[in-house]
Amino acid sequence: MFDVTGAGDMVLAMITVARAAGANWIDAVALGNIAGGLEVEKFGCVPITPQEIIHDLLTENRESLGKQRTLDRLLLELNRHRAAGRNIVFTNGVFDIVHLGHIEYFQFAKRQGDILVVAVNTDSSVRRLKGPKRPIIPEKDRLKLLEELQSIDYVLTFDEDTPLKLIEQIKPDVLVKGADYTKEKVVGWESVEASGGRIALAPLVDGRSTSSVIQKILEAYK
């Protein structure tokens, strides 16, 4: 025998804990199977944490969950990704009327690490920043569009004028913004570098911007 994993003991321990916490037999056995499966993946007999079980459940249901997350749930999943040695990349924006510039921006961001988190301004924050006529595409639709992009792993919203609070809580390994910024103008750069991360500035695609798309549409219907 190559490795004694202790999977059977882990199954029994998980069932016992689940039953003691009030779970019915069906849920307790399901949790036991998950815990046993996670134990088999490890070398030797090692503890399985509640965070690992939660992450496994979330991963299993990823299709039905989609990519949208609340901050609390996102942080749980990111902790598991970090434990597996994956680097977290973060970027943010309005992303109104998705175009080629956005696509190449996300592709660049994804290449900077393993997991790409995109924070999207709510409709109310966009109106504060860009005026009462924006966004063109409402928040719910913008999120669904971004969910369909292969390069993006998670999306969430923020209602503040800047994503500083999110950045401080997520602590990304890489913070991405467009090359029209300098590092010192990127919100959260100091926090990211203080925790050992870095800033990456994505090259711009000439002539591709939401403003230019809107202008062309207006000209087409004059």
Image (spheres, rainbow, N blue to C red):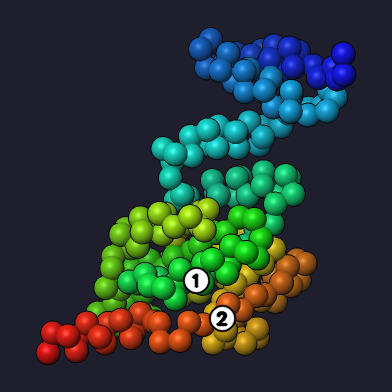
Residue under the point 78% across and 29% down? 42
Mark 2 and mark 1: Cα distance apart in space: 9 Å
**Residue 56: x and y, percent?**
60, 33
The residue indicated by pointer 2 is 203
The answer to which quarter of the image holds residue 91 is bottom right
Q: Is residue 51 above or below residue 187?
A: above
| Residue at far left of view | 222
Observer-nearest of 76 and 154:
154
Element at badge 2? Answer: loop
Q: Amino acid at mark 1?
A: Glu
Residue at image location 42% in from the left, 54% down from the top:
147
Can see residue 92? no
Q: Residues within 10 Å of mark 1 (few under 14, many from 20)?
A: some
Residue at horizontal 44%, vertical 39%? 63
Residues under numbered marks 2 and 1 in contact, where contact means CB atoms less than 8 Å apart: yes
Above or below, comparing residue 220 to residue 19 in the picture: below
Residue 4 falls left or right of residue 199: right
The relative height of residue 138 versus residue 147 in the rendered view (above or below) is below
Residue 98: image location, x then y, percent: 37, 69
Task: Determine the image quadrant of residue 180.
Answer: bottom right
Residue 194, picture quadrant: bottom right
Q: Amino acid at mark 2?
A: Pro
Residue at the spot of label 1 = 104
The quarter of the picture where the C terminus appears is bottom left
Does residue 77 appear anywhere in the picture?
A: yes
